[in-house]
Image (spheres, rainbow, N blue to C red):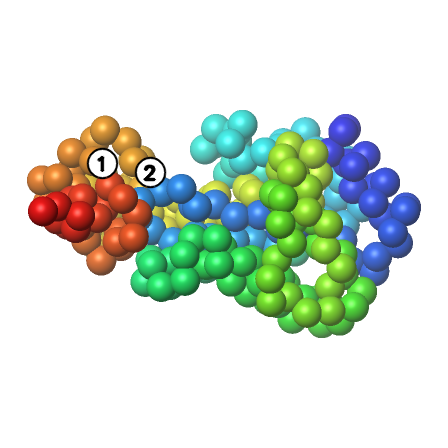
């Protein structure tokens, strides 16, 4: 169980009161929110959930649903944070992702009544989270395939964001949001050219700019 071993080594070497995995879904799409999750996986749950928990990108939708059910029944705790398209356009996608991750961490710690000083955050990617005070942080490149805590967070974030896009499809029909989840597929780009952007599109992203007529002479 390599994902479990990674977290157990961190617990052994750093001895945090709380080891929290942090990941996001939705940085690259042209539409919809960035959804971040902070997840705490008790050591007692490692063996129970490890057969199903992995990098969310490697799991089918059905396996992600099964993993969610198994984690919720095994004592895994989580908090979510979001950055909507207007915020992404206002501050840029990286800063918006930090904001969403920070909100997810604060919510998790609030739910667990845990002081930040006792937490160690394993953050997927090369950067620590900005504007999260009091927590130790360790960025982990490719963390969703290395740490069971980050993998758990990646699944929660992916499943919630996918459900959100299913709702947005009903509110903004014609773009196929429930199918491509906002990514820049050929079908999505064709719909953008035909319909123009909707309020859920990120106006600072180049394909959306072009569809809105920005950048044209």
Asked which secondary structure carries label 2, the reply is loop
User: For mark 2, does the 10 Å Cα neighbourhood hold few (<14), some (14 to 19), or many (20 or more) residues?
Assistant: some
Q: Say whether residue 100 is visible.
A: no
| Figure quadrant of residue 45 | top right
User: For mark 1, does the 10 Å Cα neighbourhood hold few (<14), some (14 to 19), or many (20 or more) residues?
Assistant: many
* Image coordinates for residue 70, horizontal then vertical, percent: 62, 41
* Image coordinates for residue 55, horizontal then vertical, percent: 59, 34
* Image coordinates for residue 79, horizontal then vertical, percent: 58, 60
Asked which secondary structure carries label 1, the reply is helix
Lateral position of residue 201 relative to residue 52, left or right: left
Residue depicted at x 76% and y 59%? 136
Q: Mark 2 points at which residue?
A: 183
In depth, the one of 165 and 67 nearer the eye is: 165
Query: Which mark, residue 84?
Result: none
| Figure quadrant of residue 124 | top right
Residue depicted at x 36% and y 42%? 29
Query: Where does the N terminus fall, quadrant-wise?
Result: top right
Residue depicted at x 16% and y 44%? 211
Residue depicted at x 30% and y 47%? 205
In depth, the one of 211 and 121 nearer the eye is: 211
Q: Name the residue under label 1.
A: 188
The number of discs equals 2
* Image coordinates for residue 48, horizontal then vertical, percent: 73, 37
Q: How far apart are marks 1 and 2 (CA)?
A: 7 Å
Q: Say whether residue 14 is visible.
A: yes
N-terminal-most mark, 1 or 2: 2
Vertical placement of 123 versus 129: above or below?
Answer: above
> Would you say the residues marked 1 and 2 are in contact, meaning their CB atoms lie under 8 Å apart?
yes
């Amino acid at each position: 169980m390599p994902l479990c071993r990674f977290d157990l080594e961190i617990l052994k070497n750093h001895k945090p009161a709380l080891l929290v995995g942090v990941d996001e879904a939705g940085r690259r799409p042209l539409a919809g929110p960035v959804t971040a999750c902070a997840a705490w996986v008790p050591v007692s749950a490692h063996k129970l959930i490890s057969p199903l928990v992995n990098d969310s990108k490697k799991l089918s939708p059905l396996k992600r649903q099964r993993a969610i059910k198994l984690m919720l029944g095994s004592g895994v705790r989580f908090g979510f944070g979001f950055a909507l398209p207007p915020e992404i356009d206002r501050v840029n996608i990286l800063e918006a992702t930090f904001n969403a991750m920070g909100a997810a961490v604060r919510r998790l710690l609030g739910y667990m009544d845990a002081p930040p000083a006792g937490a160690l955050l394993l953050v997927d990617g090369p950067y620590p989270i900005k504007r999260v005070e009091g927590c130790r942080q360790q960025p982990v490149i490719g963390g969703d395939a290395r740490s069971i805590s980050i993998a758990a967070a990646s699944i929660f974030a992916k499943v919630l964001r996918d459900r959100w896009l299913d709702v947005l499809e009903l509110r903004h029909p014609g773009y196929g949001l429930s199918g491509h989840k906002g990514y820049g597929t050929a079908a999505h780009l064709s719909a953008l050219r035909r319909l123009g952007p909707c309020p859920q599109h990120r106006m600072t992203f180049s394909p959306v700019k072009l569809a809105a007529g920005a950048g044209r002479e």
